Each structure stands twice: as structure tokens, then as C-alpha cells.
Amino acid sequence: MAVQDYIRKRFFPHLWCQGCGHGIVLNSLIRAIEELGIRKNDLVMVSGIGCSSRITGYVDVHTLHTLHGRALAFATGVKMSRPELRVIVPMGDGDALAIGGNHFIHSARRNIDMTALVMNNQIYGMTGGQFSPLSGPGVKATTAPFGNIDHGFDVVKLATAAGASFVARTTTYHVHQMISILKEAISHKGFSVVEIMSQCPTYFGRKNKLGGAVDMLDYFKSHTTAKGSDAHKKDPLMIERGIFVKEDRPEYCSDYDMLVKELQLKGDA
Amino acid sequence: MDDNVRFLQGNDVCVQAALYAGLEFFAGYPITPSTEIAENLAYHLPRQGGKFIQMEDEIASMCAIIGASLTGRKVMTATSGPGFSLMQESLGFAIMAEIPCVIVNVQRGGPSTGLPTGPSQGDVLQARWGTHGDHAIIVLTASNHQDVFRMTVDAFNLAETYRTPVILLLDEVIGHMREKVILPEKGAIPVVDRLRTSVKAGIDYHPYLPREDGRLPMSDFGGEHRYHVTGLFHDMWGFPTTNPKIVHGLLRHLNDKIKNNISDINRMKEYFIDDARTILISYGSSARSALHVVHNRRARGERIGLLELQTLWPFPYTQVAEKCEKARQIVVVEMNMGQVLLQVKRAVSRPERVMLANRIDGVFITPTDIRNILRLIHGKGV
């Protein structure tokens, strides 16, 4: 199937600002899905609220645009009910880790088979540029006019500690890596987390004087490096990209099905 | 037939009835006094191939049942006051996106943590208006275990018929009390299955275009039709819109589909109403004490009757007004500060006839409590 067959053309042009990284995520995500050859009827995408969440409207699969922070909880209902369906959950940074933080760690703990994308632009874009739990100290935002004193999460460490069996990070500059990581994440059996650093030139870039979209992409190029690279050893402030966790672990829905089968074998059903 | 006679807690009866109605998916979080519903379903659902999941909180529980309902399952969650408060946002989502689901609230004393093990009926108005925005909702209640069974099955039936969340508002007394119940044979109570679209694959399916009768046939996630579901105002494809005409039409539809069907949704029971000079109006466990008073006083020749409400919302204003037209006094018996009283006063002519007999101290209202209040009303002192 062609890449454009996965989108709902009649709803374009999309609502994201010029230069926004989310369109690159949409493009890469569809390419990953297309390369994996997933049938549209077998795929459910569940999103929360924010700029990121609008991605579901543009994809011609079963799409559920839910409440702020709750996408993973809705997705858990879908997946638990129909484990044969593939579930992808694109979220923003505030969406996934501020209001949705509890659902994030518990989904990871259960290791339920779905792919969580954290489209991390370090800001609340839809509401006009407030700091998020991934902004980090020193960042300027409309709710941090004198510089942020709030410390940020490290998504990779958080997801790993919470029990996600696949954890990766990439950026909108590294499109080929993004497609390849997304393919692995979607194919992985278990809870997979992919942090995608995405640029918001309109709010994050403007507030923090980072230039336009191209400058911000250039920043991703120059300030990130492959996991375990020499560049990172020389400069530990470089952000690592790549796959950090990939393990075979018992998956929630499979375990539940096994429990049901055992009950039936015992004749207890 | 004797096999069907049980001695059960109200919460157990609710579970039996939910399974009878075709429950396939339950998500919940422990909270007194509703926990037995989750415990029982954790035992029964996997044995029948159904799904049970204990979520991280009530917010997640409500979200999970909505997700599961979209895949074509009959779904339920159960909670009490604090958990019900947490569910309000996603309850609104289910109303907006028209997702059939059943929410059981076994009421306890509030506000806040309140009285976890004490009875109350303080959530009547929260059930109506707890979630934001203009909306309609169906709320059922029951005063005995046979009725708990029936109302639970009806809750599922109405949820499917009107594509809406239905709240089953029980209370601590009903949830924890044990009494005899006869479990109906299969087929004895009608069970409404989900209305699915007959539109074939490849033909444009409109998930939010009501048929002439107002109903909206669904298509399961994972099926042949791919569409968008959102809590935003949306068009007939489910895609977000701010078009004033569509916004207005959808808000009207969400309210009218319930309001215009009160006669189908309303359930009430009446005892000795026809010649009654005093009419008690009650519901849930309070109605048990009210009925006891009515039977005792009728035996002594007093013209007193009981109107027991089983549908609290949409409130049956017209029906209540008709039943109460000839009564000299109308006494609303409830365990709150007058939440149904307010509706009855709105419903009837000469609202000065309407008085309240209540308890709000976490103790079940007894027939003696009601009798004492009636004596005061009738000018006889205590």
C-alpha cells in the first residue's frame, strides 16, 4: 500500500504551525507502518489532548482522540478487549508525563503490548507556551517568564525504571533512525516507549531564542549523539539517541489469556 | 426453580445481573462500599472468557471501559463517591462520543472521604450534573435485590439503546445488605444487543449520523469501518468541527435523545396512591422504610401511599405531578439534604405541600424516623 493511502486526505492541510516537528513524526510513523505492512483495519491509534493528539485525525485507521493525559488508559481498554489489534499511542510531553504520568508508569509496569510515542517539544503548544515536565531548568515559558526552576524527567530512565520492555529515543532531524526505531517499537511484543524530540519553533523556539525550525533541527543534529558513542563519553551533556532497552518479558494480555486457558483446562470455567 | 433462589449481597446481585445482561469487560479500582463488585467479577469474568482489569485509579477505569466498549464489548465499572468524582471527566467523554457503558455508584456519605461505610443518597445531583457542560444522563436506582437485578439489566439495555452512559445509583445499605433474590431464567428479562451498522465495507459509514428513529448503529474498532472518535464537537464522520450549525445540532441531539424518551426510560412503582392523602416519595434503601410505614398505617386505615422512583434522571416531572395531584401532603424520604425534594417541588402544583423526611448522619433512615416526622407534619408532636 502507498504511504498516502494511510492518511485521510480530506482533512488536510493539517493544523500544525509551519516548521512544527509533529508533521515529520506523522510522516515517519506512516512510513514505519507501511514498511511493516500493517493492515489499516488491524491498527488502532489513541491520542490524548494537545498539538500531538491531533495526529490521530489524519490517519486512516481506527482512531480515538481522548482526554488530556488519558490516552494510555483508553488504549488499555482497547488492547485488553481485543489483543489481536495493534495499538499505537502518540502523546505530547505534558500529556504523557504531567497529567498522564500515572497512566504512563502503570502501562509500563504491566508491560501491555502497545507503542507509546512521546512527541517531546518541551512545551505546551496548544495552550500557548507553558513549561512542561520535560522543559528542564532555565527554560523560558509563558508560565516561567523568569526562567524555569522545575526539573525535568528523563523519559528513557523513567520508562526503564517503570518496567517498559522497549525504550528508545530519537529526534525529528534523524528521520531514518526514527522510522527504523518506530518499526522495531511497533513490532516489539510488550510496552514500547519512543521519545521523539520534536521542534516547536512557534513557542519553545521563540521564547528561548533558538531561531526557526531549521535552527532547531540543527540543534538536534549537533546536541545529540548515538547511544554509547565516543562523542557522548567526551561530552556527557550530549543527549543519547538509539534503543536503550529491548527485552522479552511477560506481556499483560498474553498472561491474561493464559490464565483463562488454565481455568478452562481445569474445567473450572 | 429452587436452584435460582439465592441469599446475596446487593453488590453480588449487581454482578449476577451484569453477567446476565452480557457484561464482557470490567475495569475498576477498589473502594468501599462497592469493592465486592470488582472482587466478584475478578472471579467470574475470566472463567467465562471475559476481561477483568484492576486499573491504577478510577479515572483510568472509566477510560478503559470506554476503550473496550468501542471494540464492541458490553462494559461496566463500579465505584463510590470519591471514585465517582474522579470519573466525571471521562463520563462526559462517553456522553459526547456516545459510548454505551454502565457506571455503578454505591453511594456512601460525603462530601470528600466522608463516611466510607455509612449509607447516604448524596450523589443524586452529582449523577445528574457532575460532568461539565449541558448534557443528559440516565440514572437508575433500586430498593431491593430483585429490583437491583432488573435495574442492572435495564441499565445495560438503555445504554445500548440510547448509546449513552447509564449510572446505576445504589447505596451502602443496598450494596451490603443480604436478602433473598430469585435469579431469573435466561430470556425472562429482555437483553438488548448492540445495534451494529449494516453498511458494507468500502461504503462511507457515518458513525454520528442518527437514523430516523434517533438511534446510531455502531461499528466495532477492528471492524471494516475506520472512523474518528473525539470528545470535541464533531461532524457525522466524528471529525472535529466548530461549525455553529453542527455544534448546535449535536448538543440538541445529545439532550433530545434522552429527554424525548422519558416514557421509555422512566421506571417507578406505586403503592396505594389512588386515594392517598399523604404520598411518600422515595427511592433506593430509604424506600424500604417508607414502604414499611405505608403498610403499617394502611392497616390502621390511614390514606397514605408510596411512590417509589427507579429512574432518577431524566426526572419524571410530569408523572410525579400527575400522581401527586390529589394529595394533601407529599413527603420526600431520602438520605440527603433534599436533592429529590427539589425536583418534586419543581414538578408538582402547590409545592408548599412538599416536605422532607431525611437523615444525613450516616445512619439508615428507619420507619420510626419517618413516623416521627409524619407526626410533626400532622401536628401531633413526637
Image (tube, coloured by chain):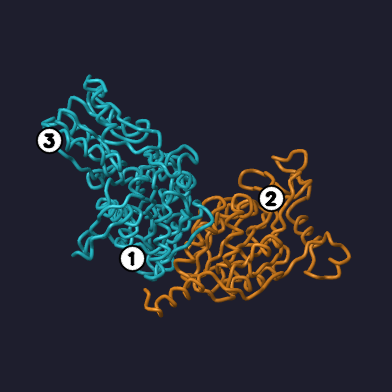
Q: Name the residue under label 3.
A: B299
| Quarter of the picture holding the C terminus of chain A | bottom left
Q: In the figure, what tint was chain A given?
A: orange
Callout 1: chain: B
Quadrant in the rendering for residue B268: top left
Tag 1: Cα neighbours inside 10 Å, few (<14), some, or many (≥20)? some
Label 2 to label 3: alpha-carbon separation: 69 Å
Callout 2: chain: A
Label 2 to label 1: alpha-carbon separation: 45 Å
Mark 1 lies on a secondary structure that is: loop
Give residue A37's position: percent from left, percent from top: 55, 76
Q: Are the residues under badges 2 and 3 in a single subunit?
A: no
Callout 3: chain: B
Single out the mark in the foreground, 1 or 3. 3
Q: Is residue B211 visible?
A: no
Which disc number belongs to residue B305?
none
Q: Name the residue under label 1.
A: B199
Q: Is residue B199 visible?
A: yes
Give residue B99's position: percent from left, percent from top: 39, 55
Q: Mark 2 points at which residue?
A: A133
Give the amino acid at mark 2: Pro
Give the farthest residue toward the right.
A234
Single out the mark in the foreground, 2 or 1. 2
Kindly identify the residue that appears in the image at 76 percent across and 46 percent down. Answer: A139
Seen from the viewer's position, the closer of residues A92 and B154 is B154
> Would residue B330 appear left or right of A69 to someone viewing this image?
left
Q: In the figure, what tint was chain B given?
A: cyan
Mark 2 lies on a secondary structure that is: loop
Kindly identify the residue that appears in the image at 39 percent across and 59 percent down. Answer: B75
Instruction: Tell me whether circle 1 and circle 3 mark residues in contact (CB < 8 Å).
Output: no
